Image: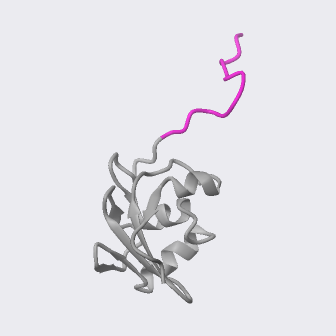
Amino acid sequence: MAWPERPVRGREPEIPDPADPPGRQRIDKWLWHARVVRTRSAAAALVAAGHVRIDGERVRAPGHAVRPGQVVTVALDRHVRLLRVIAFAARRGDAAAAAALYEAVGRDT
C-alpha cells in the first residue's frame, strides 16, 4: 500500500474560498486582512454598526463585496481612515503584506 504524496516543504496549496470570486472580496474579510481591525468578528461588527462606507455609500452587510479601485471609509474610535483597495490576500499576513492591500487616500483624520 502506497502512502499519498505530500508536499516536502511548506504548506498545502491555498484553496480559494468560493465565497470570494476573483476580482472581489467580502468587506469584513478585507478589513481583517488589511489589519484595520484585530479580528474578523470585529470587522463584521464594525460593518454591521454602519461605520464603513464603500465609495461614499454606507454598508451594513459584512458580506458586501469590495473591488479593486474602490475607496473604503472606516470610522474608528478617534479617527476616520480613507483607503483605496489595491489588492486582496488569501490569508492574513504581517503588517507589510497588509499595507500592500491598500493606499491611503488624502489625510487620515
Q: Residue at x 47, y 55 (%)?
A: 101
Counting every numbered tag in the picture gives 0
Q: Quadrant of residue 95?
A: bottom right
Percent position (x, y) of residue 21? 34, 48
Q: Position of residue 13 (x, y in %)?
A: 57, 33
Which colour scheme appears in the figure? one colour
Query: Magenta part of the protein: which range?
Result: 1-15
Q: Quadrant of residue 2?
A: top right
Q: Is residue 43 left or right of residue 105?
A: right
Q: Is the residue 22 above or below the residue 82 in the image?
A: above
Residue 105's place in the image compared with 53, above or below, is above
* Left or right, 70 with reference to 2: left
Work out whether 20 lies above or below 2. Answer: below
Taking the image as shown, residue 69 lies to the left or right of residue 86, namely left
- Residue depicted at x 44% and y 77%: 107
The quarter of the rendered structure image containing the N terminus is top right
Question: For the stretch drawn in magenta, what is the main secondary structure?
Answer: loop
> Is residue 14 one of those drawn in magenta?
yes
Residue at the extreme bottom of the image, as rendered: 78
Q: Nearer the viewer, residue 107 or 33?
A: 107
* Residue plotted at (45% across, 47% down): 17
The location of residue 59, given as percent across then percent down, is 34, 78
Q: Nearer the viewer, residue 109 or 71?
A: 109
Residue plotted at (39% across, 67% down): 63
Residue at far top of view: 1
> Against 58, is 83 above or below?
above
Is 4 colored magenta in this rendering?
Answer: yes
Q: Can you name the residue that lies furthest to the front here?
A: 107
